[in-house]
Image (cartoon, rainbow, N blue to C red):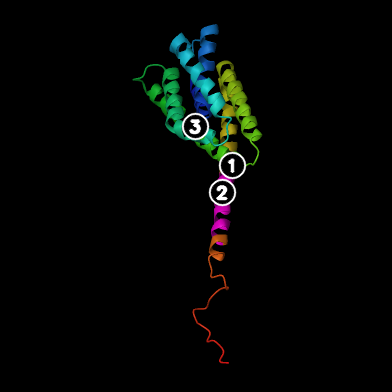
Amino acid sequence: MESLALTFSSGWASGINAYLVVLVLGVVQRTTGAEEIPDVLGTWPVLTAAGVMFAIEFVADKVPYIDSTWDSISTVIRPTIGAVIGVLLAGEADSLGAAVGGVVGGTSALISHLIKASERLAVNSSPEPVSNSVVSVAEDGVVLGVVWLATQYPLAAAGIAAVLLVAGLVLMYFVVRAVRGGWRRLTRRGRRGSGPPGGPSDGTTKPYPVQ
């Protein structure tokens, strides 16, 4: 159960910032030798690659519209990393536990990624650019806290991740609903403004008065 809880928490966090998840797990494994975290995550090549990619995402994730482009590129990357972490945490790749871990990690990462992408589209509609940085820093802080907590108290971290996942789904529902409502209003305005300049026509022509 603790391994599955760690997998779920890491998968949820991977959907928001996969490179930070790898970096945190790798640092914890290297500094504490935690048995539940695979040794490969604590190797210098993995830590270096995760650190470089995290630095790039740290900047890109805080620039309006560039963050949404980065999210589009990461649609496949984040769930894949979440699934790989799930397999590694479960153990042998040919075991049923590894398959379950891959599904749990990949699915939770995909859902949280879609939530983040929709949330960023809503944030980008704000006229000021500060909100992107604030949201991004908050997301990084939550990911850091949840993943670190998962290495110490997996069940508690999984509970927090589950609550955040449900809250994100509710938020995404309202965001999508608001976007649809906005498009409908724009469409109606466009239809109203597409009539002839002289006003609406009933299909008949009026004769000119005879002088």
Q: Is residue 69 visible?
A: yes
Cβ atoms at labels 2 and 1 below 8 Å apart: yes
- Between the residue at mark 2 and the residue at mark 1, the CA separation in whole angstroms equals 8 Å
Disc 2 on helix, strand or loop? helix
Three-letter code, disc 1: Ala
Q: Residue furthest front?
A: 211
Mark 2 Cα-neighbour bin, 10 Å: few <14, some 14–19, many ≥20:
some
Three-letter code, disc 3: Trp
What residue is shown with label 2? Answer: 179
- Between the residue at mark 3 and the residue at mark 2, the CA separation in whole angstroms equals 21 Å
Disc 1 on helix, strand or loop? helix
Q: Quadrant of residue 55?
A: top right
Cβ atoms at labels 1 and 3 below 8 Å apart: no
118 relative position to 98: left or right = right
Mark 1 and mark 3 lie on one chain; the one further toward the N terminus is: 3
Residue segment shown in magenta: 173-188
Mark 2 and mark 1 lie on one chain; the one further toward the N terminus is: 1
Q: As displayed, is residue 183 above or below residue 165?
A: below
What residue is shown with label 1? Answer: 122
Q: Position of residue 87 (x, y in %)?
A: 41, 21
